């Protein structure tokens, strides 16, 4: 959880500078951020965080989503064109989204299975 919070804080600090995730950690490799969107959209592929050291990096709510979490995520996709555009650019079907979380900087974090 500590590394995940570090990732979110780094993204929040670098976002106003127009920089992407420029940290030297493995999270820069697996977190993909859409450019030129408002709010910023970060897509996290859950399977990239399944290793023994990374298991706690994705909140349990999004690793094993309830029907309510899944429905809220789908509703967020329908209501936010930036999220739909980011998913389309990456070729990710909306049905693969486990949930959407609002980051500290107002951006959206999309958890994809």
Image (spheres, grey):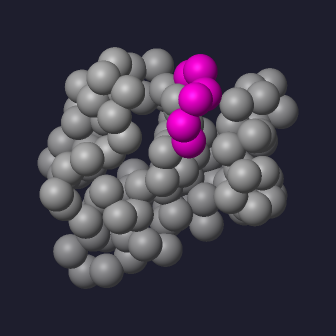
Compared to 33, does 96 lie above or below? below
Q: Nearer the viewer, residue 85 or 108?
A: 85
Residue at x-position 35% and y-position 64%: 29
Residue 106: give x, y in percent of width and height. Answer: 46, 19
Q: Magenta segment, principal secondary structure?
A: loop
- Residue at the farthest bottom position: 52
Q: For this view, does 69 lie left or right of residue 2?
A: right
Is residue 34 something that shows in the picture? Answer: yes
Residue at x-position 60% and y-position 28%: 37
The segment highlighted magenta reads 34-39
Residue 76: give x, y in percent of width and height. Answer: 72, 31
Compared to 48, does 80 lie above or below? above
Name the quadrant of the C terminus: bottom right
Q: For this view, does 106 lie left or right of residue 14?
A: right
Residue 87: give x, y in percent of width and height. Answer: 71, 50
Residue at x-position 74% and y-position 26%: 80
Magenta region includes residue 78: no
Q: For this view, does 99 lie left or right of residue 76?
A: left
Residue 14: give x, y in percent of width and height. Answer: 27, 29
Q: For this view, does 76 lie left or right of residue 107?
A: right
Compared to 97, does 16 lie above or below? above
Magenta region includes residue 35: yes
Is residue 5 something that shows in the picture? Answer: no
Q: Could you say which quadrant of the image residue 16 lies in?
A: top left
Residue at x-position 19% and y-position 60%: 25
């Amino acid at each position: 959880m500590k590394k995940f919070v570090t990732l979110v804080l780094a993204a929040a600090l670098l976002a106003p500078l127009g920089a992407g995730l420029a940290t030297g950690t493995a999270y820069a490799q697996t977190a993909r951020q859409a450019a030129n969107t408002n709010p910023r959209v970060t897509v996290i592929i859950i399977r990239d965080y399944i290793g023994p050291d990374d298991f706690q990096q994705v909140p349990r709510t999004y690793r094993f989503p309830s029907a309510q979490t899944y429905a809220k995520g789908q509703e967020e996709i329908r209501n936010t064109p930036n999220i739909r555009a980011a998913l389309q650019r990456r070729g990710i079907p909306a049905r693969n989204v486990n949930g959407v979380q609002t980051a500290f900087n107002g951006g959206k974090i999309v958890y994809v299975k």
